[in-house]
Image (cartoon, rainbow, N blue to C red):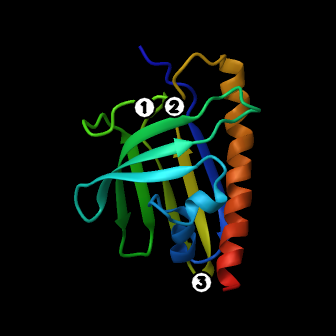
């Protein structure tokens, strides 16, 4: 029986077009996300299922001053672009034969989660970003550690994302 934990939802208007925001968010090996998101150390492509569907392994660093050991997550991810310019990334945990648990990492479990980048009418350089996740970190962490980690980590996510988008504009 998995402890499902809390469902977190973030929402912000960020300065940058949906394409720029997505460029910073997309879960790809050697993408921008590993450079700015402190909770993502590495993305590995496990399988390219279709053009829009992948299976990825995400590696996270240790956190909370080492209380939270490095984790890895294996998810199936669907990326979809809509006619109105909205871009979504939808993911959930999957067991994949070529990506068994690895030593040195606690295997975590993502319930359905994702990001939605929505264009704002009349504001081409702004994007409404929704993010939601429900993560079981696995292992034997006290609930209080988990509950205190996610909210502050989410604030940091939006702050670091804004800086990453700004640095894209400057180049």
Residue underneath mark 2: 105
Residue 61 at x, y percent in the picture: 62, 41
Which residue is tagged 3?
Answer: 122
Task: Residue at 29% x, 57% y: name it.
Answer: 53
Query: Could you tell me residue 100's position as x and y percent?
Result: 34, 32
Residue 76: x and y in percent read 33, 46
- Place residue 132 in its image quadrant: top right
Q: Label 2 neighbourhood size at 10 Å, few (<14), some (14-19), many (20+)?
A: some
- The total of numbered circles placed on residues is 3
Task: Give the SS element for disc 3.
Answer: loop
Q: Tell me the element at label 2.
A: loop
Query: Which quadrant of the figure contains the C terminus?
Result: bottom right
- Dot 3, how many residues are within 10 Å of its Cα: few (below 14), some (14-19), or many (20+)? few
Tag shown at residue 102: 1
> Decide: marks 2, 1 in contact (CB < 8 A)?
yes
Question: Going from the N terminus, do you reach mark 3 or mark 2 first?
Answer: 2
Q: Secondary structure at mark 1?
A: loop
At a point 54% along the width and 28% down the height, the residue shown is 137
Residue drawn 44% across and 18% down?
2
């Amino acid at each position: 029986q998995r402890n499902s934990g809390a469902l977190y939802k973030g929402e912000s208007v960020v300065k940058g077009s949906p394409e720029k925001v997505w460029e910073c968010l997309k879960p790809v090996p050697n993408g921008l996300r590993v450079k700015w998101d402190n909770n993502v150390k590495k993305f590995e492509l496990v399988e390219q299922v279709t053009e829009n569907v992948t299976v990825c392994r995400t590696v996270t660093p240790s956190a909370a001053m080492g209380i939270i050991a490095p984790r890895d997550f294996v998810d199936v991810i669907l990326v979809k672009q809509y006619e109105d310019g909205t871009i979504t990334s939808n993911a959930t945990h999957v067991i994949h034969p070529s990506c068994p648990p690895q030593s040195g990492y606690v295997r975590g479990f993502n319930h359905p989660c994702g990001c939605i980048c929505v264009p704002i009418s009349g504001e081409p350089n702004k994007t409404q970003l929704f993010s939601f996740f429900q993560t079981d970190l696995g292992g034997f962490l006290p609930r209080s550690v988990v509950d205190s980690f996610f909210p502050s980590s989410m604030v940091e996510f939006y702050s670091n994302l804004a800086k990453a988008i700004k640095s894209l504009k400057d180049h």
